[in-house]
Image (cartoon, rainbow, N blue to C red):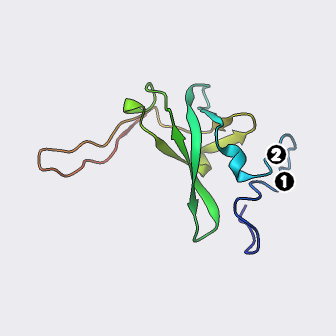
């Protein structure tokens, strides 16, 4: 839900949830939450938020201390906000690729694109 122009982006994460239940009051409450895939596999911890200031909304969650079974070399990853299924005491994702691999440099020095192996 987009925030009004007079609203502070970091004040309200969610104003209401029709299905009821726990509701976040501040976006900063996401920091430190553990993140799990829809299959219950631990991904990592939310360490920061990536904000699209042009439209005043959280674009992604920055996840660190990632599970090496899901992310090569346990690198930090940005998870698009649209992939989130639920937020409460933990974050549950509706989608995450089977495995994220790290960008590699080829012999010419140019980087290859990161590959999502599903």
* 29 left or right of 76 in image: right
Q: Which residue is mark 2?
A: 23
Q: Identify the mark nearer the N-term, 1 or 2.
A: 1
Calculate the distance from the C-alpha at mark 1 to the C-alpha at mark 2.
Answer: 7 Å
Q: Check the image and report above or below for 70 versus 53.
A: above
* Residue at image coords 71%, 52%: 27
Q: For residue 90, which quarter of the picture?
A: top right
Q: Check the image and report above or below for 58 versus 91.
A: below
Mark 1–mark 2 CB contact (< 8 Å): yes
Q: Check the image and report above or below for 46 versus 66.
A: below
Q: Quadrant of the N terminus?
A: bottom right
Picture disc at residue 106: none
Q: Which residue is mark 1?
A: 16
Q: For residue 2, which quarter of the picture?
A: bottom right
Crowd tier of the residue under label 1, counting other residues whose Cα lies within 10 Å: few below 14, some 14–19, many 20 or above? some
Q: Position of residue 62 (x, y in %)?
A: 53, 46
* Residue at image coords 64%, 62%: 57
Q: Quadrant of the C terminus?
A: top left
* 68 left or right of 11 in image: left
Q: Position of residue 34 (x, y in %)?
A: 63, 33
Element at badge 1?
loop
Q: For residue 93, which quarter of the picture?
A: top right
């Amino acid at each position: 839900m987009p925030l009004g122009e007079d609203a502070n982006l970091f004040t309200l994460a969610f104003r209401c949830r029709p299905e009821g239940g726990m509701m976040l009051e501040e976006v900063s409450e996401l920091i430190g939450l553990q993140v799990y895939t829809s299959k219950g596999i631990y991904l990592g911890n939310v360490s920061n938020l990536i904000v699209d200031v042009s439209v005043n909304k959280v674009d992604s969650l920055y996840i660190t201390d990632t599970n090496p079974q899901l992310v090569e070399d346990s690198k930090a990853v940005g998870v698009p906000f649209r992939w989130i299924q639920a937020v409460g005491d933990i974050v549950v994702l509706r989608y995450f690729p089977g495995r994220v691999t790290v960008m590699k440099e080829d012999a010419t020095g140019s980087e290859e694109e990161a590959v999502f192996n599903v």
